[in-house]
Image (cartoon, rainbow, N blue to C red):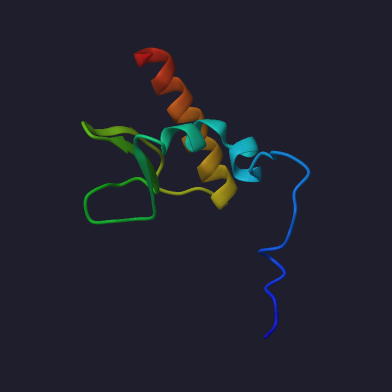
Amino acid sequence: MARDRRSSKKTSGPSQDPLETRYPNIAAWVQDGWIEIGRDDHSRSFVRALDIGGMVWEGEAEYPTLDAALRALDNGIATWLNGHG
């Protein structure tokens, strides 16, 4: 039987997830809230941040790239947190 090499992989210490590094506010937000990406019938925005109380931030209808949408989301969450923290 072949061994799964992924399970025997050793790490030299904790490393930060690239997504967490690039979008720290999104990474923190999804611990207690959630994000939505994509269009739906209930919102005009492409990206949104929500919590138990509902929508806290929503972006534009379109972005040139997914990275641009995620950067806007990360900045929007940071702005919201600064006003509600």
Q: Where 3 falls versus 71 (above or below)?
A: below
In this view, the residue farthest toward the right is 12
| Residue 40 spot, x, y in % from top left | 28, 56
Q: Is residue 11 depicted above or below 21 in this figure? A: below
Residue at 39% over, 22% down: 80
Above-or-below relation of 3 to 50:
below
Looking at this view, name the residue that lies furthest to the bottom: 1
User: Which residue is farthest front?
Assistant: 1
- Labels in figure, total: 0
Q: Where the C terminus falls, by quadrant?
A: top left
On the rendered structure, is 41 left or right of 21?
A: left
The residue that appears at 52% across and 42% down in the rendered structure is 70
- Residue situated in front as seen by the camera: 54 or 39: 54
Q: Between residues 16 and 18, which one lies in front from this camera angle?
A: 16
* Rendered residue at 41%/41% (across/down): 60
x and y percent of residue 27 in the render?
Answer: 50, 37
Quadrant in the rendering for residue 76: top left
Please identify the quadrant where the N terminus is shown. bottom right
In the rendered image, residue 11, in percent from the top left (x then y), is placed at 75, 48
